Amino acid sequence: MDNEKITVRITESGQTMELVVLNKRAERIEVVLGEGVHSVRCTLSPTRNALAYAGSVSGREIVYERSRAQVKADIDRVNPTLRNTSRR
């Protein structure tokens, strides 16, 4: 199984890290920091201007610097059948 990874920036130090994505939607992105018993889940939500996603882990803010439109385009590119579903 090939896990999707995204690169986020820690705002306090400016460092970047790669995190494994659990669930990716335009409304939120769920990621995991660490491995095994020491792993921590985090939900990244779009910022007010929708130009990035932000979340908090252990009191530290992390930012995924892609806009909501870019993430939606990524999701549509990976699985175009999700775009064409209709609710009955």
Image (cartoon, rainbow, N blue to C red):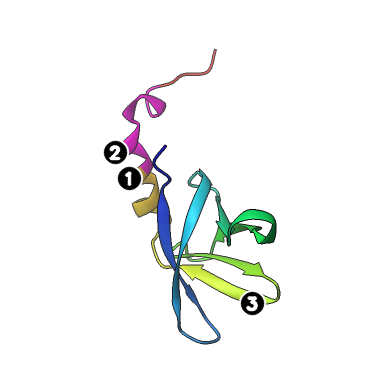
The circle drawn on residue 13 is none
Kindly identify which numbered label has been placed on residue 73: 1
- Majority secondary structure in the magenta region: helix
Choose mark 1 or mark 3, whichever is in front: 3
Coordinates of residue 46 in the picture (x, y in percent): 53, 59
- Disc 2 marks a residue whose amino acid type is Arg
Q: Residues within 10 Å of mark 1 (few under 14, many from 20)?
A: few
Labels 2, 1: front one: 2
Along the horizontal axis of the image, is 50 left or right of 45? left
Q: Residue at x 32, y 45 (%)?
A: 73
Residue 80, horizontal then vertical, whole percent: 32, 29
Real-space CA distance between mark 2 and mark 3, rounded to the nearest whole angstrom = 31 Å
User: Which of the 4 image quadrants contains residue 32?
Assistant: bottom right
User: What span is colored magenta in the figure?
Assistant: 75-84
Q: Residues within 10 Å of mark 3 (few under 14, many from 20)?
A: few
Q: Secondary structure at mark 3?
A: strand
Report the residue marked by disc 2: 77
Q: Residue furthest left?
A: 77
The residue labelled by disc 3 is 60
